[in-house]
Amino acid sequence: MEMDPVLAALNQTVLISGPGPFVLLGVPGLETLHAWLAVPVCLLYMAALAGNVLLLGLVAADKTLQAPMYQLLGLLAAADLVLATSTVPKALAVLWGLSAEISFAACLAQLFVTHVAFIAESSVLLAMAVDRYVAICQPLRYGALLTQRVVGGVAVAAVTRGACVMAPPVALLQRLPYCGQRELPHTYCEHMGVARLACGDTRPNVWYGLATTLLSPALDFGLIATSYAFILRAVCRLPSHGARCKALGTCGAHASVITLFYTPALFSFLAHLFGRHTVPGHIHILLANLYVVVPPALNPVVYGVRTQQIAQRLRHLLRLCWVGAVRGVSPERASHSSE
């Protein structure tokens, strides 16, 4: 039986231009609490913006913070800014009832940038774990192994890896037919969330999503855990009790933020693939929002302020700003006068 020419032309037009705009529904089942849910999300996003911009500015402008460790912190801050900014503003617009619609092209762009930023941040966290392992377990080789050129390579590799991983699913989503379903139960666009709206065969999306989850964030998480296990073994051999406690406290803070980054993300990815009918929708969406806003807000504190040299430079900058405000001069002039 041949397809009606008009219907065939219509289908071809949809495939070329994509479906009409999607409607983001927010957190299903908690619609009456959307305005309240937006408050902590907004506060965390503001903290993430302030903390990461300040950390990135310090690393970029301060000549004493040019070591590879601090440059990796700058890469982490940049990834956090992109991850949070690509999702949270639209999520707040949805939760506050300002704008729930998003075009197909904008949806694809959002999920591409979000996932690239997530994979890039995962890659940077892995590089930071290796950096700490070499510094603690192989200190004599640290200067030779980790240079500014290596950090530049990490930045390029992290972004390239994310783009290469996310280009195929975007192409798969563009090729799927969409038959009028426009409501997306989420606060932002995710790969499998959009694929569920299609009326074609989504098995390639499912299997590709599973493969990338296992070979990207899950693999990175395992390697980071292994690196920190070696670090803890070296720390436990330190002769000084005070040094052991300080190192264990630092490793514990890092492990907490890393777990908070990976656990909700992996849960969200796997819930889209296997837990669609077993995981409550509001739990899934809340966790999906957790990993794009909480780690970016905590990372500047855990990795930045807790680092002694960054904390000293930050206190120096705040002191200059305070002196400048009291005297009515710029921080630069205050710096010269304090010298």
Image (cartoon, rainbow, N blue to C red):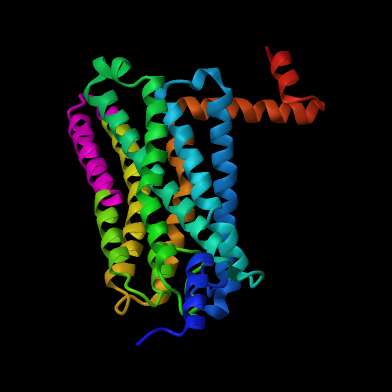
Query: What residue appears at the point 38 percent right and 66 percent down from the top-left corner?
Result: 192
Quarter containing the N terminus: bottom left
Quarter containing the C terminus: top right
For residue 334, what is the image quadrant? Answer: top right
Residue 39 visible: no
In this picture, residue 319 sits left or right of residue 121? right
The boundaries of the magenta stretch are: 216-243
Does the magenta segment cover residue 234?
Answer: yes
Query: What residue appears at the point 47 percent right and 47 percent down from the top-left corner?
Result: 298
Image vertical order of residue 36 relative to residue 119, above or below: below
Image vertical order of residue 24 relative to residue 268, above or below: below
Q: Position of residue 310 (x, y in %)?
A: 50, 28
Judging depth in this view, the residue of 313 and 48 nearest the camera is 48
For residue 202, what is the image quadrant? Answer: bottom left
**Number of numbered discs on residues:** 0
Residue 125 visible: yes
Q: Position of residue 128 (x, y in %)?
A: 35, 34
Judging depth in this view, the residue of 175 and 281 nearest the camera is 175
Which residue is outermost to the top?
339
What is the chief secondary structure element of the magenta stretch?
helix
Q: Position of residue 299 (x, y in %)?
A: 45, 43
Query: What residue appears at the point 77 percent right and 31 percent down from the top-left corner?
Result: 325
Does the magenta segment cover residue 277?
Answer: no
Query: What residue appears at the point 52 percent right and 52 percent down from the top-left corner?
Result: 84
Which residue is outermost to the bottom?
1
Q: Position of residue 102 (x, y in %)?
A: 58, 67
